[in-house]
Amino acid sequence: MRRSFAFKCTVLTVAWVLLAIGALQIPPYQVWPAAFVGMSLPVALFLNAGWLLYWLLRRWPVALLPLAVLVLTWPHLQRGLALHPLGPDVNADYEPVRVLSSNVRIFNVYRQLRGKNFASSKAMIKWVAENPADIICLQEFYNEPQPTQENGQVFQSVRRIGQEQGRQPFVSVSLENRIGAQFGLAIFSRYPIVRRGTIPFGRLTQNHAMFADVRLPQGDTIRVYNAHLQSMSMAEQDIVDSYSSKAGLKAKGLGLLRRFKRGLVARARQVDTLRRHMDECRYPVLFCADLNDLPYSYTYDQLADRLQNAHATVGNGVGATYNGRLPFVRIDNQFAGPQWQIQDFRVHYEIPYSDHFPTSATYRLAKKQIQ
């Protein structure tokens, strides 16, 4: 009887895994509750691993079922828990392309963020500027083209990260304030930018994407995308309160659910726009983004079906990028097209100035690309 019950639970777990994987393919603007089923996939995969161990000890032929599921869903497991103890096998035919991506939270320009004497702002801009990356993609970028009476030259970030470091800047401005300061996205490149453009997500949002076609020294042209997708507009404290107590869940739960739904739907439409744009690109693609979504989401799934995720391909561990009280949250990502070999990937936990940790990766083209 016990074995029969355990076998039924194993079959139900396998069905759960398959259902959750299928749910990741459903756009939230069509059936938004499917997103919750997809988000449950890590739990289902964990249970499947548990049943594998159980049957290996009890009756090994039955273990073949959860083992087959583990093998077939290994790429999905790697999304949330990457395991590469031996490191990647990389062809060194080409010079590496080093990429840094970071949501810099407008360099903490607001008084409540920047600290005394602009300490965190200065430290963040200095670290980004002096980073050895060949290409830098920044989300929630901020720049003051001219010195101001209040801030001096602290926030002349285009000059400090770009011209002073030998990088060509491309800033996609989503908002400009009364002093001419620029908010938006930015790409900086040590290689020539031969073409550039922006990808709007609609008139009702400042979130958007940008791209730059970059000519590498060996003559290949690549396309670098930088994007910031729709935020959930959910305060961290509200989320913590909602799961800390029944009273908190009752007070905050419904409002959080509404905002969560709006964010899911918006990001799904935005990633569809990005996917169509990428499908028309004939160059090898590098993609950096603050997705504001988890690895087990429609947003991530649409990208992972077409591109390699740098952390999932060569990283280790969870790779959390959110610098806050919510644990194990990875919403900042780098992706690469199939033409690339990913040499390494790192989350910079030593850089605490923003609510996002920077990420860096090194890429090499697998073979000569025909232009």
Image (cartoon, rainbow, N blue to C red):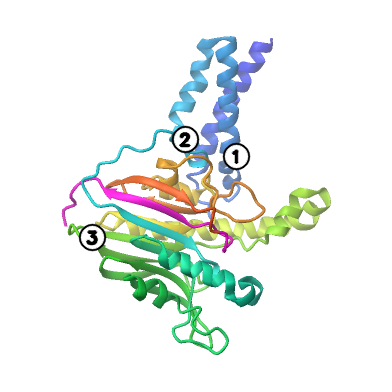
Q: Which residue is mark 2?
A: 83
Q: Position of residue 273 (x, y in %)?
A: 41, 60
Q: Which residue is mark 1?
A: 40
Q: Position of residue 295 (x, y in %)?
A: 51, 46
Q: Label 3 near label 1: C-beta < 8 Å?
A: no
- 262 lies above or below 58: below
Foreground label between 1 and 2: 2
Circle 1: residue type? Ser
Structural distance between the alpha carbons of marks 1 and 2: 20 Å
How many C-alpha atoms fall within 10 Å of the one at disc 3: few (<14), some, or many (≥20)? some
N-terminal of the pair, mark 1 or mark 3, is 1
316 lies left or right of 2: left
| Observer-nearest of 3 and 310 | 310
In the displayed image of the protein, which residue is found farthest to the right?
247
N-terminal of the pair, mark 2 or mark 3, is 2
271 lies left or right of 231: left
Residue drawn at x 56%, y 9% is 59
Find residue 232 and report its image quarter: bottom right
